[in-house]
Amino acid sequence: MCEANVYMEREGVEELVMESVDIVEPEENGAWRLVGIFGDQKTIRGRLKEMKLVDHRIVFTA
């Protein structure tokens, strides 16, 4: 599968935000819409730090 886990990094510590994310879409004002493989959704604010798709990881910073 091609889904990834999304993490938010704050003060050097990563916190899992959402598992099995299929879609990451930018929204207004620095927000991002995350959609999971089962249709669950979450909106976060932050800056994209890195994407390691082979490792199934996407990291944002606050």
Image (cartoon, helix red, strand yellow):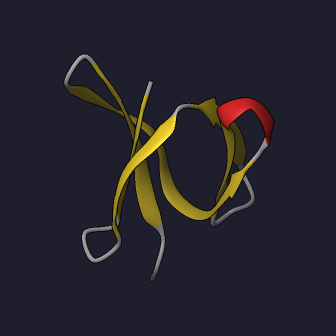
The image shows residue 15 at horizontal and vertical percentages of 33, 30
Observer-nearest of 6 and 39: 6
Q: Residue furthest right?
A: 28
Q: Residue furthest bottom?
A: 1
Foreground pick, 48 / 52: 48
Tally of numbered discs: 0
Up/down of 17 relative to 37, above or below: above
41 lies above or below 52: above
Residue furthest to the top: 11
In percent of width and height, residue 39 lies at 75, 59
Instruction: Choose top left, top right, bottom left or bottom right for residue 7.
Output: top left
Residue at image position (49%, 38%) is 47
Q: Measuring 19% from the left and 24% from the top, which residue is drawn there?
A: 12
Question: Is 12 positioned to the left or the right of 27 in the image?
Answer: left
Tell me which residue sits at (55%, 59%) in the image: 21
Q: Nearer the viewer, residue 18 or 28?
A: 28
Drawn side of residue 53 relative to residue 30, left or right:
left
| Quarter of the rendering occupied by the N terminus | bottom left
Q: Is residue 49 above or below residue 28?
A: below
> Which sits in the foreground, 25 or 18?
25
